[in-house]
Image: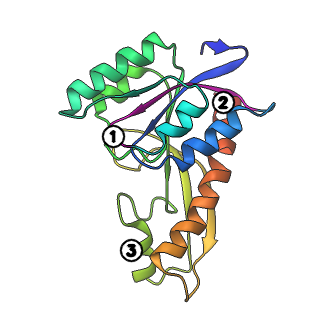
Amino acid sequence: MEKSFGKTNTAVFISGRGSNLSSLIKYSKTKKSLIRIALVITDNSDAKGLEYAKKSKINNIFIKYSDRESFENRALKLLKKNNIDLICLAGFMKILSRKFITNVYIPILNIHPSLLPKYRGLNTHNRAILNKEKYSGATVHIVNDKLDSGKIILQEKVKILKSDSVNSLKKKVLKIEHKIYPKAIIKLLTNY
């Protein structure tokens, strides 16, 4: 892995409001950080998360998602150009192809709002509540070619209360996501 000032050059892929991106930017500015966020890529020109990238003067690129292949080809070129050694998916709502995953030759991390392997995919909070689960949580895992099925790096759980709604559970899980994503990056990079 190529290091920039001893830190791993990292790209963050986002699609929405970017709260995990904001958390990763804060972490990247700490002394103990192992990453330098060099690039933010989004498939959504209106992604609120772009504001965090702009505020922190991080190179940020919108790539129109007309089809997966053209999006991924453009992303691959940008990753190479920016010497990226780690990709963090943070609320990126597209599924990357097997070809992309194998062609990047670098780890891709994703954060998912459930205790994988339970509740892969979407509507995790709703499904956990409907199934009367006692706990939910967040999982950081390595991306492979099967949805939300890669090697788990770190998980943390939260108790689901009878009073919890989808919205209140989402807020609790998001707090955990912000806490464990940087920890998972440290775990991955110190064992890589």
Q: Amino acid at mark 3?
A: Arg
- Residue 172's tag is none
Q: Secondary structure at mark 3?
A: helix
Residue 97 position by quadrant: top left
* Magenta residue check for 109: no
Disc 2 versus disc 3: nearer the observer: 3
Q: How is the image coloured?
A: rainbow
Q: Is residue 142 above or below residue 159?
A: above
Q: Is residue 99 above or below residue 19?
A: above
Residue with the mark numbered 2: 189
Q: Which residue is painted at 54% across and 33% down in the image?
A: 53
Q: For label 3, count other residues whose C-alpha is less than 10 Å away and answer few (under 14), some (14-19) or many (20+).
A: some
Judge from the rendering whether residue 174 lies leftward or rightward of residue 13; answer left or right: right
Spatial separation of the CA atoms under disc 2 and disc 3: 33 Å
N-terminal label among 3 and 1: 1
Disc 1 versus disc 2: nearer the observer: 1
Q: Position of residue 187 (x, y in %)?
A: 68, 38
Residue 186 seen in the figure: no
